[in-house]
Image (cartoon, grey):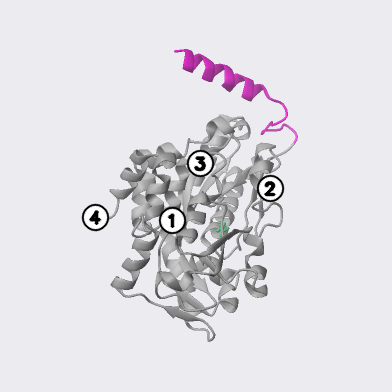
Amino acid sequence: MLKSICALAVGSLLLASTSLHAASDSGPIVIKFSHVVADNTPKGQGALLFKTLAEERLGDKVKVEIYPNSTLYGDANELDALSKNEVQLLAPSLAKFEQYTKQLQVFDLPFLFDDLEAVNRFQKRSKGRQLLRSMESQNIVGLAYWHNGMKQLSATKPLLVPTDAAGLTFRIQPSSVLQAQFSQLGATPLVLPFAEVFEALKSGKVQGAENPWSNIYSKQLHTVQPYITETNHGVLDYMLVSNPRFWYAIPHQIRTQLEGIIDEVTYEVNRQAEAANQADRNRIAATSGTQIISLTDEQRDAWRQAMRPVWQQFEGVIGADIIKAAQTVNRNKR
Ligand code: LMR
């Protein structure tokens, strides 16, 4: 009871807030959507489709501005900008929410999900749905999960067995799980914003990275990484987020339409992400200068074993129940 009274009070306070007003009599609601990747990626395409459908269906009521490639905000400041309502939609990788919730780190655990379909099943089940709301007390509302793809390891030398990674520096997203994953291999993890990855690889500041094919191809990372090992060792997915003070202040009818559009866009992004990644893999395979290394089952298992201690390390902070729920979504139970 007390909870719901508090929720009501907080709700009306938020709605009364004038600094974050969404609707305006004088013009359309402007939704700035900032992201760090290229247009020709699953997230980039999703953002553009959202703009098209929202402006088609909501006419002069809504204007969507898309800022790709960290042109408005980058990894370092986009969530802060969201909290100040300077931007209204973001879709950061799930690895980038650590300071708001530890629970989403489940998605970074190496070799937890066999493939994107397993990730999809987890996101649709109750634990996955709950995680969309795990940051509401921090003024972040999760509207949807969008897929990118499974990550591959790339480096300046061939990575066949886990010890091959020892001594190399790998660029990582800001996630303690990913940090532990590379430390486990005897490698040095270095957190860098996505916008700096190409230059860091090119200059030799880092010698390796982990990315889905679409991010490798769209940023031409393969041109500075002669070896890519097809490890599929983890997932890079996104949460489409907004500031609840902005989102819930949008007039109900318009918000409902926007949420319907988000459902449609989510369906499209997630339906096409795997194929888009495979197409980019094939484009990279067709270029000279980069060797794609396929692992045998035994080799892949050695990587799994080498990274596996990370699960135990983070079980306490993520929650054993969440990890367990995630484990049930693989078809080949281990
Ligand atoms: C990364 O930093 O590697 C990714 O999160 C970039 C992205 O948004 O796909």
Q: Name the residue tied to disc 1.
A: 270
Which numbered tag is attached to residue 77? 2
Tell me if 36 is positioned left or right of 153 in this view: right
Ligand 1 is within 8 Å of the C-beta of the residue at disc 2: no
Number of the label disc, if any, that sits on residue 84: none
Quarter of the C terminus within the rendering: bottom left
Tell me which label, 2 or 1, sits earlier in the chain.
Answer: 2
Q: Is mark 2 on a helix, strand or loop?
A: loop
Label 4 close to label 3 by CB (< 8 Å): no
Identity, as a three-letter code, of the amino acid under mark 1:
Asn
Looking at the picture, how far across and down is residue 195, in whole percent? 66, 61
Kindly indicate the quadrant of the structure image that contains residue 26.
top right
Q: Is 139 situated above or below 261?
A: above
The residue located at (73%, 38%) in the rendering is 27
* Residue extent of the magenta highlight: 1-26
**Mark-to-mark CA distance, 4 and 2:** 40 Å
Seen as rendered, the residue at the extreme bottom is 288
What separation in Å lies between label 2 and label 1 (alpha carbons)?
A: 27 Å
- Helix, strand or loop under label 3: strand
Q: Earlier in the sequence, mark 2 or mark 3?
A: 2
The N terminus lies in quadrant: top left
Q: Mark 4 points at which residue?
A: 333
Provide residue 312's location: percent of width, then percent of height: 37, 48
Tell which of 106 and 165 is nearer to you: 165
Q: How crowded is mark 4: few (under 14 residues within 10 Å), some or many (20 or more)?
A: few
Q: Which residue is drawn at 62% across and 54% down?
A: 35
> Can the viewer see residue 263?
no
Q: Which amino acid does label 3 sit on?
A: Leu
Indicate the secondary structure of the residue bearing disc 4.
loop
